Image (spheres, rainbow, N blue to C red):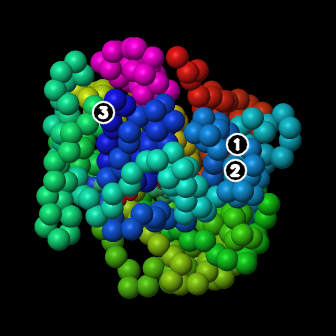
Amino acid sequence: MADTAIVVGGGIGGLASAVALAEAGWRTTVLERARELGEVGAGVALTPNAVAALGGLGLDGDAVAALGPRTWATGTWDWHGRPILRLPDDPGLRATTALRGVHRARLHGALLDRAGALGVEVVTDARVTTVTQGDPGGERAVVRHAGRAGTEQARQADLVVGADGVRSAVRAALYDGRGPVYSGYSSWRAVVPGLSVGPGLLQYWGPHAEFGTMPVSDGATYWYGYVRLPEGTRFDDEHSAAAERFAGWADEVRRVIDATPPAAVIRHDVLHLPGGLPRYARGRVVMVGDAAHATLPTMGQGAATALEDGVCVGRIVAAGVASGRPLGEALAAYDATRRPRCRALARASVSSGRFGSHLGPRWQGLRNALLRRVPAAAVTRGARAVMGWTPPALP
Ligand SMILES: Cc1cc2nc3c(=O)[nH]c(=O)nc-3n(C[C@H](O)[C@H](O)[C@H](O)COP(=O)(O)OP(=O)(O)OC[C@H]3O[C@@H](n4cnc5c(N)ncnc54)[C@H](O)[C@@H]3O)c2cc1C
């Protein structure tokens, strides 16, 4: 009989894991707390490693092209609109600057279709309350979940994937005291239909803030405004609050906010896991995505690494076990592959924030003057190891 897996959470990391598990022949169920599966959020910039991960999940070049336009990171401007660092759409830089501008709902929908085609069962209104980790060589893991009608259920599985995001219930059950912390920053996001700003991802840095725009599917523009704010701040009108916060910024920034329907603006406080987890596997449970390594969004790698994790759950764990490797060994191999990379990325995201959007008013001029002297190729060189990721070979 096929091995069984339960994936907790039907976000990008959960669906990627479910696809990869099903591809390796595992009977897979996704438990999602929402009543309807969908993706909250706006746009996402898919870097080359994210595109490679999608390839590893069976989405070929045409399927990826259908997700959104090909675009690139054009560089960084100061908040007045003066260039700090320009990145031309040059073949020599594309290994690190090429992007797909994608509406998150479209990415999520493509993963869900692929999971459905592979026979993955998706159960909604199933909020996981706790997990018992089991033993890779013995007892199976147990997942308990509840629905809104008060129904409670326990399910057993050979493998549980903790993919329930930054406030993970799986992490809370298995990793004492490893909760997320507020980054000090909050992010407005929106997709504006029928608005064209430029062909690339444009980023503006100002004191304790960053604004970005990027074309996404269906001729729309995605923007984000990432700002320092006390945790839990609420505004009666988020659109007006964003317009006010970016009032003195470059014309293009104000034009994009003004063109945004107020109802399209969402905002989330950004949490992360500064110390990471000591291991990405416990018993028969493996952790992926934000549940394992929520990072600052300053390098735009959260969704990309969640996709990479999903591919690795399939290729290292599920296919490994299917080819005769003991589960405990396969989980240790997943941890050894994923943890160093994700920790390094989390640290790099903190450094990138310090030097970029988290920098205060005093150092803006010096930072900008320094960056203006650095050749584009030198800036992108460091990013190659991140963006050059490819899926591990099948056993
Ligand atoms: C402002 C901002 C901008 C970003 N921009 C980018 C970008 O450009 N590129 C990029 O790669 N990344 C970006 N990210 C990061 C990216 O959004 C996340 O890292 C990614 O979505 C994580 O996916 P996930 O599946 O791990 O978690 P989530 O997307 O949070 O999914 C978790 C799922 O689990 C469900 N769930 C939660 N608790 C339970 C429970 N108890 N039981 C059952 N289900 C549960 C949730 O409902 C949800 O469906 C950005 C993040 C922020 C904050």
Are circles 2 and 3 on residues that touch, CB within 8 Å? no
Residue 8, position as x, y percentages in the image: 32, 47
Place residue 260 in its image quadrant.
Answer: bottom right
In 3D space, how far apart are the residues under numbered discs 1 and 2 (Cα atoms)? 5 Å
Q: In this orientation, which residue lies closer to the viewer: 370 or 108?
A: 108
Region in magenta: 312-338
- Real-space Cα distance between discs 2 and 3? 29 Å
Callout 1 amino acid: Asp
324 in the magenta segment: yes
**Dot label at residue 63:** 2
Q: Position of residue 276 (x, y in %)?
A: 33, 35
- Residue kind at label 2, given as amino acid type: Ala
Q: Amino acid at mark 3?
A: Leu
Dot 3: what SS?
strand
Which numbered marker is on residue 185?
Answer: none
- Magenta stretch, overall SS: helix
Look at the image and tell me in which quarter the N terminus lies. Answer: top left
Q: Secondary structure at mark 2?
A: helix
Instruction: Name the residue rendered at 21%, 39% in the picture.
Output: 156
